[in-house]
Amino acid sequence: MPDDKYTRCPGCSTVFRVTPEQLAMRDGQVRCGHCKAVFDGNAQQVSLAPPAPPRDDDASAFDEAAQGPPTVTLRDARALEPPDIPAEPAGATAAGGEAPPEDRFSRPVPATSRRARTVGYLVAIVVLLALLVAQAAFHLRDAIAAHWPQMRPALARMCGVAGCTIRPLRDAAMGYLSIDASDLQADPAHRGLLILTATVRNRAAWSLAYPYLELTLTDAQDQVVVRRALAPADYAGGTADVQQGIPPNGEVAVKVFIDASATTQAGYRLYMFYP
């Protein structure tokens, strides 16, 4: 091809076919795929054009030895290796691999740069792990505080920065909360007034959030007459700290007055739920 150039390895005299673009890519620095010598491909360029035959009148001027060896070992540029590639991958490239030219002519990466890059990767991994742990702690803060109370101060400091709160766990159908006893009686002193009494018990070893109570009044055919939802503040009493939840292995006594003067009921049902 018109753009082909040739460079000779000073170590073993092997000649490689190269292009100007390849030599310009890494300032000409290459490694011989035959003897592994590193050399400047630009400085070692040679011409393989056949020597001009001597003129009949100047036969004595032709010196065959001065023209170089009559034959050369010619190899393709793919046999050249970048100086920083080990011998084993370099052998695969010389055998006919299709490594990109920019890799074959790349400059060696300094050891300090490789170490700095490794340290950077390690720091990034540590930072990502810390962020993952912080995210998990944020989303699971209620469960962590319930099961590991010693972590509550650290979680409280985190919430002070993130603007969150630590709340008691909800029972979520685990069966730790139950209504042990309930009763609905008419208030003898006030006509049409009903008194609901019950005991909500927490059997867990950690605090649980106060549930809502749903009171349903039914008629003689067990049809719904009226239904009312009672928030924790409606039944827990003025001295209870609703935000702290029901203490571990604790109970809450419920006593609520219900105005049923406008209804007629024969029975009731009482359930717990979380909104």
Image (tube, rainbow, N blue to C red):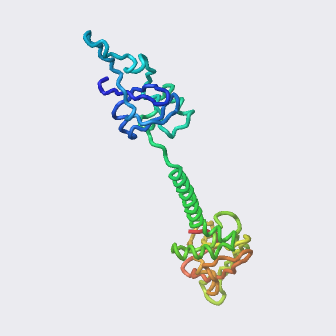
Residue 9 placement, left or right of 246 = left
- Foreground of the two, 104 or 200: 104
Instruction: Tell me if residue 71 can be seen.
Output: yes
**How far from the left and from the top, in percent, is residue 229?**
57, 73
Name which quarter of the figure residue 264 lies in. Answer: bottom right
**How far from the left and from the top, in percent, is residue 68?**
40, 21
Picture quarter with the C terminus: bottom right
Picture quarter with the N terminus: top left
At 57% from the left edge and 80% from the top edge, which residue is drawn? 260
At 57% from the left edge and 82% from the top edge, which residue is drawn? 259
- Foreground of the two, 72 or 207: 72
| Residue at the top extreme, as displayed | 56
**How far from the left and from the top, in percent, is residue 126?**
58, 59
At 29% from the left edge and 24% from the top edge, which residue is drawn? 2
| Residue at the bottom extreme, as displayed | 189
Q: In the displayed structure, would residue 247 be above or below residue 56?
A: below
Q: In the displayed structure, would residue 141 be above or below residue 109?
A: below
**How far from the left and from the top, in percent, is residue 74?**
43, 22
Q: In the displayed structure, would residue 230 be above or below residue 94?
A: below
Name which quarter of the figure residue 25 lies in. Answer: top left
Instruction: Tell me if residue 228 can be seen.
Output: no
